[in-house]
Image: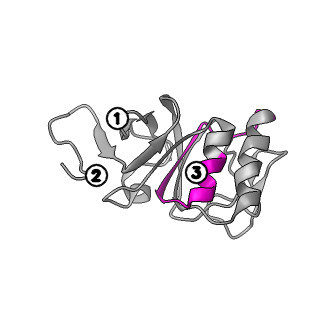
């Protein structure tokens, strides 16, 4: 089976397999956008919201949510900011990307944050906004448990 393939044998939920994954299993509410991610430029890390006015999630709280976004942008500042956010308990529960750079992977590892990336589908188009999702990094699986409310 190729990475990102929907598992048709499971009628309870949709599953998508990532090529890359780190962290612990988590379950939570997805905050989804076909947009990119920079912890430095897109977030108000004290308020816990997306603050860049042109970001598709502007005004939404990311705290304790599973972010599902297109790709990571930025460098070492974004990486260490993930750790700072986790230390302040103002961090996402996990982050999921279509693609990610090695620096942000290091940042997620340093922050103890679960991350999945590299799907054969555009993950931002198949995970419904507000859906309850389970991430299993050991199996590299994102499972949609239920549709969101918008």
Residue 1 vs residue 39: left or right? left
Magenta segment includes 92: yes
Q: Outermost residue, left direction?
A: 9
Residue positioned 58% across, 64% down in the render: 36
Sequence-first tag of 2 and 3:
2
Residue 102 placement: quadrant: bottom right
What is the distance, in whole Å, between disc 2 and disc 3 at their CAs?
Answer: 19 Å
Image coordinates of residue 19 in percent, x first then y, are 36, 51
Label 2 SS = loop
Give the residue pinned by disc 1.
139
Give the residue pinned by disc 2.
3
Q: Are marks 1 and 3 in contact (CB under 8 Å)?
A: no
Residue 143 placement: quadrant: top left
Label 1 SS = loop
* Numbered label attached to residue 25: none
What is the distance, in whole Å, between disc 2 and disc 1 at their CAs?
Answer: 11 Å
Up-down relation of residue 108 to residue 120 (above or below): above
* Residue range highlighted in magenta: 88-107
What is the image's colouring? one colour
Name the mark nearer the viewer: 2 or 3: 3
What is the distance, in whole Å, between disc 1 and disc 3 at their CAs?
Answer: 18 Å
Give the residue pinned by disc 3.
105
Within 10 Å of disc 2 (Cα), the crowding (few <14, some 14-19, many 20+) is some
Residue 112 placement: quadrant: top right
Sequence-first tag of 2 and 1:
2
Image coordinates of residue 62 in percent, x first then y, are 66, 45
Q: Nearer the viewer, residue 63 or 81?
A: 81
Label 3 SS = helix
């Amino acid at each position: 089976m190729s990475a990102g393939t929907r598992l048709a044998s499971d009628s309870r939920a949709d599953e998508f397999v990532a090529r890359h994954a780190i962290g612990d299993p988590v379950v939570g509410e997805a905050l989804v956008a076909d947009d990119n991610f920079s912890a430095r430029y897109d977030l108000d890390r004290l308020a816990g919201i997306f603050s860049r006015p042109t970001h598709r999630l502007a005004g939404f709280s990311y705290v304790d949510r599973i972010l599902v976004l297109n790709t990571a942008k930025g460098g070492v500042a974004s990486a260490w900011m993930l750790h700072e956010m986790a230390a302040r308990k103002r961090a996402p529960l996990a982050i999921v990307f279509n693609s990610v750079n090695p620096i942000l992977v290091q940042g997620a590892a340093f922050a103890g944050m679960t991350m999945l990336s590299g799907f054969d589908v555009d993950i931002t188009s198949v995970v419904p906004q507000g859906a309850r999702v389970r991430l299993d990094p050991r199996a590299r699986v994102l499972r949609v448990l239920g549709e969101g409310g918008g």
